[in-house]
Structures are given as C-alpha cells and as structure tokens.
Amino acid sequence: MAQEKTIRFGVLGAGKIGTFHARTLAGLKQAGVSLVGVCDPDLMRAQKVAWENNCTPYSKPEELIPQIDAVIIAAPTQLHHKLGMYCLENGLHTLVEKPIAVTMEEARDLIRLAKRKELVLQVGHVERFNPAVVEANKFIKDPRFITINRQGPYDPRMSNISVVLDLMIHDIDLLLTLVPSEVTSIDATGLSVFSAHEDIANVRFRFANGAVADVTASRASFERARYMHLFQKDGYVSVDFMNARVKIYKKEKPVIENMQDITVQYPKVEKQMPITAEQLHFINCIRTNKTPSPSGEKGSKALELALKITEQIHRFDVPKTTHLHTPKPLQMVSDVARAAQIMLDETLEHMKRED
C-alpha cells in the first residue's frame, strides 16, 4: 500500500493561538504532516515559536506560502480576509481562526474563492471539538432551553473586537449546531468595562421550533468559567467545557415522588485536546476532500448572527462629538439666566458697599 503524501503546513501568526497551533502540528507527524514554518511580522516572536517546534521562522507570508500545502491563519481578525484570500489564491487548504472575517462581504469572498479553487476552508470553532461537547451530543435530543456562560479575565490582545466576536461566537456556533431550527429573534445587551468594545454581553435567542437560549460572555471576570446546561424532555444535560465533564439528569418515572426517581449519569469523556481533534479533522478533510466542520458557510452563519447581536447592542448609541451643542431656545434661556445672575450679584455687592 502506497504511503500517503506528507502535507506540508505553515502557521500565520505567532501569538497565543498561533503558538498552540504550531505546537500541536509539530506533534502530529504520525498523521502524515510536517510543520514547515511559522510566520509573523515580528520576526523575533516567529523565531521563538519556530525554534521551539523545529521549523523555520518567516516575517513575510510570501516567503512561506510557496513551500506549503496547507495553512492555519491565527493572525488578528482584521487580517483574516487579506491573508485568507492570498493563501487560497496560491492553492492552499486553509483553516482560519474564528471569526472567519470582520464582515459578511469578506466572509463570502473567502467562501467563493475556496469553492472556485476546490480547496478546504475550515473555520476555527475549536469548541465543537471539545471532548465534553462531543460526548454530550450523544444525549442531546431536542433541547427546549439552553444556558451558556463563558467568562474569563481581560485579554488586551483582543481589545480591538467585541466580546461577542471574541468569545460568544463559540457559543453561537454551538447553538446553530445543537438546535435544528432557525433563529427568529435576539434580545441583546452589552457593556464596555475595560476596552472600547463590549467586554460583557448577554443575549436571549428564540428559535422557530420554540427553543430558547440565554448566553452570557464576559472578559471582565477574574475567574474562568465555561459551562452549558441543556434542558429537554425528561431531564437535562450539563457540560463543563473547561474540565471536560458531562453530567446527565434523567427522569425515570412519569411522576417524580423523590430523588430516587431521577438518575444521574457521568459519561466517560475521551481525554483529547480540542485543538488536536480540530487539526486532525482538517487533515482528514484535505485527504478525503470532505466538507469540514464548520465549513466556511457554517462559520459565516455564526459571524452573521454575531454581527446582528453587536448591531442590536449599539442600536441606541448616541453619536459622539467633540462639543455638545445646546439647542438655540435653551441657549437663549441660559443666556438670560446668566445675565440675571450677574445683575443680582452686582446689586448685592453694591448694597454691601453702601452698608
């Protein structure tokens, strides 16, 4: 049997996420991949990651691209479109970190080009590959009410985008996967705490099939917490994303008389890093020409909903100006009042002098 051709990989971006991707790829030689290089405009940062993973550092994408077959884009969100288009134009299978792009127009550009070039375009929604989520999926059947909470400390690296695009988009993607129905309405609120964008947001989603979901994302907390509860007929499913744990509560009788009528299960969760499962899925899609999960289309749906949420949060924003202008009628009243105050002050001062 002929040995499969080695897939040559590159990573664009040597920040926190890019470092994780490079480290994981370097450990997947048994999957028939080779990490050729890491690219970052900051060559020193690229060198550090490259040397740690026995590959070559680059500061310019055009130096790395000709030497690879597939790429992982872990650069800032505003560069996803430019880098993604360049990589796809040069025939590279591309995994772009979430969100796929900044705007829907940019996302559609990437999707169209990947289709035209017949290349795999996967979006990095790594939570889909969390082993706890994979296991919980076996027990989730038509959830009626879902709560998701994702919180953690502030990260200045992500201050250029809203917490909706930074963190909540993971849960938006999960909801679109878990609930087989269209979103009919959203009710969103958000607040800026440390950055110029929302650092905490809460959204209520309503679906055409009657399901409801409450999702909260915060990067203004000193504690990390990531969990999900799905309530469905005869019980509910609890998922701890961080500790990869699943708990199943199930009603065993039509009428609950005591707690003995409720069973609690703790399914065994496979211990695998989500980013490893994500990359293996990407590699398999390249080799078999399968549609990835999530594909560009699925990833763009999560982006579309995230942008609608952000728009709703800002629907009552008042445009900021450098000067506040008082309406003319009020200005006239203000001027008269000020003149009257001056006259009164002068009269009182004159009376004091006469005394």
Image: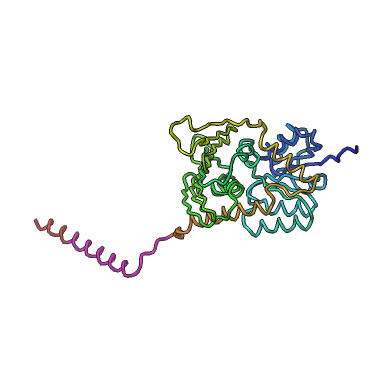
Percent coordinates x, y for residue 261 in the rendering: 48, 32
- Left or right of 146, for residue 47: right
In the image, residue 50 sits, relative to residue 206, either above or below, namely: above
Q: How is the image coloured?
A: rainbow
Residue 342 sits in which quadrant? bottom left
Residue 54 in view here: yes
- Left or right of 110, for residue 7: right
* Type of secondary structure dominating the magenta stretch: helix
- Left or right of 45, for residue 264: left
Q: Residue at x 77, y 40 (%)?
A: 37
Residue extending furthest toward the front: 254
- Which is more toward the observer, 242 or 257? 257
Q: Residue at x 58, y 36 (%)?
A: 241
Percent coordinates x, y for residue 266 in the rendering: 57, 30
Percent coordinates x, y for residue 24 in the rendering: 72, 35
- Which is more toward the observer, 90 or 234? 234
331 falls in the magenta region: yes
Residue 195 in view here: no
Considering the image in quadrants, where does the C terminus appear?
bottom left
**Magenta part of the chain:** 323-346
